[in-house]
Amino acid sequence: MASSKSTKTSSSIVIPDAFAVVSDENKFGLPIELIGGDYADEMRVAVQLALQAGANMVEHLETKGTKSGRGAESKLGINTKQNDADFCTAIDILNEKIITEGIKKHFPNHEIIGEEDTGTGDIPPLTDKPTWIIDPVDGTTNFASGSVYTCVSIGLCVDSSPVMGVAFSPKTNEMYLGMKGFGAYRNGERIQSVDDESVEKTLSNSVVCFEFGYARTDEGIENMIGAVRRILKHGCRSTRSFGSGVLDLCYVASGRLDVVYTGMADEGWKPWDYCAAKVIAEEAGCVIRSLKEHNGVREFDSDNKVIRSLKEHNGVREFDSDHLIFTLNL
């Protein structure tokens, strides 16, 4: 029987033993279905590292905006990247160090691509070697502001394709897991993007999430606002913008959102913004497609993405009669 021992950190996040199974007492263990999966060893390590990194975020999230948290944001060691809207904190750097060192300890022959290590430089191409893609604090602006919509994201690619993803939201205490061919889970419960017993989804009754990103040119702003305008004129239940690409995808995967898109200007997500969550979303029944043509083909690529909860209709996967992908293709 697997061990259920755990370690309690100063942040009150309980980190389970590496071989712990999910239970009523331990919601961050691995579900039985994943323990026999192809990447169970990698997932165990990723879960522990995500919890350790998440623990580093809790104090700021809980004290920001309170009397005891006066000056909290100024203590984060904020460093600007492209502009004032694109920055990292000392916690981003610390978390990436913890995760990178943990992966190297257990998997010394694996490659690692981290957001902070890459910075604004060229993103290394994927090879046939197992490669981890890390976002140590996804939703850094939210984190600095004390918002709950921030998480740690750890994904694994094999043969240049994402196969395993772990996303931990420390403020909401939710752990999302996905393994190719073995399903997606939130705190040990299987998740699915579409409820077959609910009303069929169309754009008109969907909650649509979008992310604007860092574009500040007149053309970029008009492209981003124009897409929202077209959705609202068509009609949708509501729109949202949470500021965390990873959680956006996890929320579509678990039915909290119906659609999320980005990439209408120059703010398309980087690999660490979606690698882990892509596995979670697809294993929950979602489909990812490109908003724009890539090499003459409309497909998912690194610059322009939309994730959609889809249902089969006459044997064809489509969102609704207006084909959201093409409607938004400005």
Image (cartoon, rainbow, N blue to C red):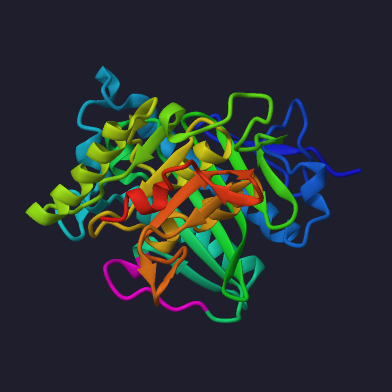
Q: Is residue 141 above or below residue 109?
A: above
Q: Would residue 210 be found to the left or right of residue 129 on screen?
A: left
Quarter of the rendering containing residue 156: bottom right
Q: In the picture, which quadrant includes the N terminus? A: top right
- Residue lying furthest left in this view? 218
Q: Is residue 151 above or below residue 116?
A: above
| Residue occupying the point 37% across, 61% down | 270
Q: Nearer the viewer, residue 307 or 169?
A: 307
| Residue occupying the point 44% across, 59% down | 272
- Residue lying furthest top in this view? 67
Is 85 one of the magenta-colored residues? no
Q: In the picture, which quadrant includes the C terminus? A: bottom left
- Magenta residue span: 117-126
Q: Nearer the viewer, residue 292 or 193?
A: 292
| Residue occupying the point 32% across, 45% down | 140
Percent x, y of residue 302: 40, 66
Q: Is residue 317 above or below residue 230?
A: below
